[in-house]
Image: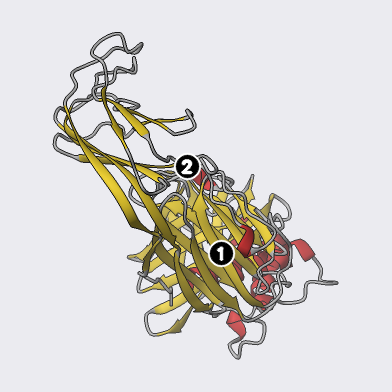
């Protein structure tokens, strides 16, 4: 089954000491500060400031932006300034509380005496100006308590998802174990870090059991998510090797979630968090595939044999459990059997077309779900003797193609549909019930430029009536 963990671990900032200033509305000032002057005060502190927290309750709604609409400058004993502005929150609601946290530049602590200057309703020259009822500026000495946890041993065909919350100055540390080497076709470890309910600028790194750095990533995946990939062939990257390695030994690993511009050291103990301090919520997803493939060496068509392995491994991941395996007692769940089916189809298409790339997925009741080798999403179903559905873009779920727009049929073992009602393009494959209402399927995208549907009727096992 699909393993989803609802653990919510957060980096915690413990305020050891602090002072807070309540700042009334200071009227508007222009972008050059030529209008109303700032609210200002001098203060003597007996602690070192490591973080500045700005919080305000919005009095009026803005149609465009609240970017940099509050400016806070803290002058240190050395004469250096820590100057910061509220980030761009986008359009927000009236009475919404806006908070920004800023780490003081390492090596330049705010010490006594201190001057604090605040511009409320600061005009940044973009859109309407912000207006706050009251602003609160807190100078704080903080201790960072890292978040994270132990995700245990990953199952052989599993997707593990965990939610967390990261703050600037800290990191979330997640440990997990893969029980078998990633070294055969269909084996894969893929780790994706994505924002959850908003925007957060994160980075991710992987360390081995000895605490040694293996790889890190920043905005390299779909939608600029952070992604680490280890596989002889990445199942969702059109057959390319894993971006960060083609193999990975069995063992315990640590995934470290941090904010942007982190300096990932050579070991876990030498990580320096980045300057990005505006944290947020994230989702961490680990996909682990341990696969038993058929040996394609010396087969009549190694490319088609590889497609069978690929589709079967993807199908297992979608199902969340190992169903297809060369050692299966059910011959229909062996990749070698899938290869024979794909080879038969390719032979029938020899005079008019070819087989191009694999797909795979699971069945629950009459619903088919799946993925292709580029992570496009298949959502289809058996309905009244026919098969139809959609292929969706992985980036946002919009329709990329329609399956069975004109024809989609199935037998007790095989299925075939047109793509977007085209005469020449098809998805064809095999399906099997594994137990109860559950099942699995593997298919291919193929083409026949003339004579359809006659060339594939022998493979399908019955006449195809109504092909576009």
* Residue occupying the point 63% across, 54% down: 264
Res. 238 visible in picture: yes
Left/right placement of residue 36 relative to residue 15 reads: left
Q: Residue at left 35%, top 48%?
A: 140
Residue situated furthest bottom in the rendering: 329
Above or below, 94 against 223 in this view is above
Q: Which residue is mark 2?
A: 109
> Residue 166 versus residue 309: which sits nearer the camera?
166
Mark 2 or 1, which is nearer the eye? Answer: 2
Q: Nearer the viewer, residue 33 or 412?
A: 33
Q: Considering the image in quadrants, where does the N terminus appear?
A: bottom left
Badge 2 element: loop
Where in the figure is residue 142, as x and y percent of width and height?
39, 54
- Is 36 above or below relative to 334? above
Is residue 223 found left or right of 45 in the rendered image?
right
Comparing 27 with 202, the one in front is 27
Circle count: 2
Residue 75, percent from left and from top: 41, 30
The part of the image, by quadrant, that contains residue 282 is: bottom left
Q: Tag 1's secondary structure?
A: strand
List the residue tagged with mark 1: 255
Query: Looking at the image, is mark 2 or mark 1 earlier in the sequence?
Result: 2
């Amino acid at each position: 089954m699909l393993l989803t963990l609802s653990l919510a671990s957060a980096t915690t900032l413990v305020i050891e000491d602090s002072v807070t200033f309540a700042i009334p509305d200071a009227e508007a000032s222009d972008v050059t500060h030529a209008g109303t002057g700032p609210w200002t005060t001098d203060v003597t502190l007996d602690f070192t400031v490591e973080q500045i927290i700005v919080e305000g309750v919005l009095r009026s709604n803005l149609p465009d932006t609240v970017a940099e609409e509050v400016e806070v400058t803290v002058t240190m004993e050395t004469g250096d300034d820590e100057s910061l502005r509220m980030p761009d929150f986008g359009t927000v609601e009236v009475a919404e509380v806006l908070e920004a946290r800023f780490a003081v530049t390492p090596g330049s602590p705010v010490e006594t005496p201190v001057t604090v200057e605040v511009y409320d309703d600061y005009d940044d020259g973009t859109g309407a100006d912000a207006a706050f009822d009251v602003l609160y500026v807190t100078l704080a000495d903080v201790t960072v308590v890292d978040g994270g946890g132990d995700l245990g041993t990953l199952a052989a065909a599993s997707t593990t998802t965990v939610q967390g919350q990261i703050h600037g100055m800290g990191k979330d540390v997640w440990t997990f174990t893969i029980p078998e080497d990633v070294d055969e076709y269909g084996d894969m470890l893929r780790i994706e870090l994505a924002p959850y309910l908003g925007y957060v600028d994160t980075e991710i790194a992987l360390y081995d059991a000895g605490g040694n750095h293996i790889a890190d990533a920043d905005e390299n995946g779909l939608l600029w998510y952070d992604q680490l990939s280890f596989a002889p062939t990445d199942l969702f990257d059109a057959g390319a090797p894993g971006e960060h390695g083609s193999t990975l030994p069995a063992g315990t690993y640590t995934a470290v979630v941090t904010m942007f511009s982190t300096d990932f050291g050579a070991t876990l103990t030498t990580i320096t968090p980045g300057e990005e301090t505006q944290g947020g919520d994230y989702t961490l997803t680990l996909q682990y595939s341990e696969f038993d493939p058929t040996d394609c060496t010396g087969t009549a068509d190694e490319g088609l044999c590889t497609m069978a392995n690929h589709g079967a491994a993807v199908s297992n991941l979608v199902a969340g459990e190992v169903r297809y395996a060369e050692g299966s007692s059910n011959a229909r769940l062996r990749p070698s059997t899938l290869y024979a089916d794909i080879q038969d189809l390719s032979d029938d298409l020899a005079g008019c077309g070819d087989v191009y790339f694999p797909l795979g997925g699971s069945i629950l009741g009459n619903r088919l779900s799946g993925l292709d080798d580029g992570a496009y999403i298949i959502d289809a179903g058996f309905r009244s003797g026919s098969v139809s559905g959609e292929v969706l873009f992985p980036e946002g779920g919009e329709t990329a193609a329609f399956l069975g727009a004109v024809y989609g049929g199935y037998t007790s073992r095989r299925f075939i549909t047109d793509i977007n009602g085209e005469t020449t393009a098809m998805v064809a494959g095999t399906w099997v019930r594994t137990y109860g209402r559950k099942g699995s399927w593997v298919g291919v995208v193929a083409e026949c430029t003339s004579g359809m549907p006659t060339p594939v009727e022998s493979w399908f096992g019955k006449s195809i009536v109504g092909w576009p």
